Image (cartoon, rainbow, N blue to C red):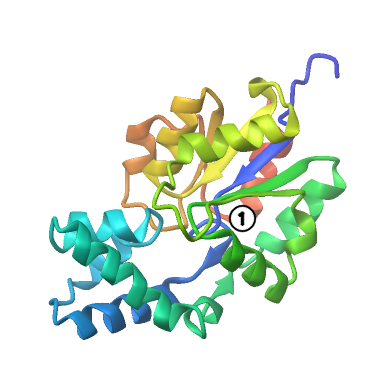
Amino acid sequence: MGMNMAKKYLLFDFDGTVIDNSEGITACIRYALGKMGVPVPDENTLRRFIGPSLFDSYMNYCEKNEENAARFVELYRERYAPKGYLETRLYDGIKDTLVKLKADGKVLAVCSSKPLEFVEKIAEKLGIHDCFSFFSCPGFATHDSDKRSLIENAVEHFGADKKDVLMIGDTEFDINGANEAGVDSLGVLYGFAEDGTLQKCGATALAGSPAEVYRVISEWKN
């Protein structure tokens, strides 16, 4: 490989990095909270629900009540499973970036706290399923969507050396997870993080658009 130690294994977060699913998610949150009679938070807070586990978001932004948080997730899925997950679109230019990275010989995986079944269905629908060799995502039964363990799961699956791995994501959970797992991170600024968050968490590099994601990865030197 010579002097240029480029990243070979690319782990992509899904929501806010590959897909913009804010429309479907916020509609499902409103639906679930409405059924529970819990006040719907303002737009800014609603955006913060996107990325972390729904259970955790409910506990953080609505009320510290595990029973209600579990009920919220159930009601959310009641609308999300038949239609909410399809209210989504690819970020402009991301498919092109994924296709080119794969053509360059990179190995791509999804590393998301969204349940596996939804990620695979959305990836199919949007025509990007074939770009990915592996999906490191939780099943329905688990609340544990800890990024560190999802990243480590992918590293183990590929038998990769951590220095050849790059986590690409839009929130502090992606960057912190990468730091904890001991891999480099590329923070994308077009997703759901608030300004300055990814820099504060210590992202190894930053990209402002899907096209820039391709450029930064292509030029990467360890």
Task: In the rendered view, tell whether residue 97 sits above or below residue 75.
Answer: above
Q: 38 or 213, which is in the foreground?
A: 38
How many numbered marks appear?
1
**Is 82 situated above or below 135?**
below
Q: Secondary structure at mark 1?
A: helix
**From the viewer's perspective, is 32 left or right of 153?**
left
The image quadrant of residue 49 is bottom left
Return the residue nearer the eye: 58 or 71: 71
Q: Is residue 78 above or below residue 122?
A: below
- Specify whether residue 184 is in view: yes
**Residue 163 location (% of width, % of height):** 65, 21
Percent across and percent down for residue 21 are: 48, 71
Name the image quarter holding the C terminus: top right
Which x, y percent locates residue 100? 80, 52
Residue at left 28%, top 70%? 72
Using residue 54 as the reference point, say whether residue 138 is left or right of it. Answer: right
Disc 1 designates what residue?
A: 210
| Residue 186 higher or lower than 183, as above or below | below
Of all residues, the one furthest to the top in this rendering is: 3
Amino acid under disc 1: Pro
Q: State whether residue 91 appears in this view.
A: no
Residue drawn at point x = 13 percent, y = 55 percent = 64
22 on left or right of 213 = left
- How dense is the environment of label 1, judged by Cα within 10 Å: few (below 14), some, or many (20 and up)? many
Quarter of the picture holding the N terminus: top right
Kindly identify the residue that appears in the image at 59 percent across and 59 percent down: 116
Q: Is residue 78 left or right of residue 157?
A: left
Indicate the position of residue 212 as horizontal and vertical percent values: 62, 48
Depth check: give the residue in front, 20 or 143. Answer: 143
The residue positioned 36% from the left and 81% from the top of the image is 27
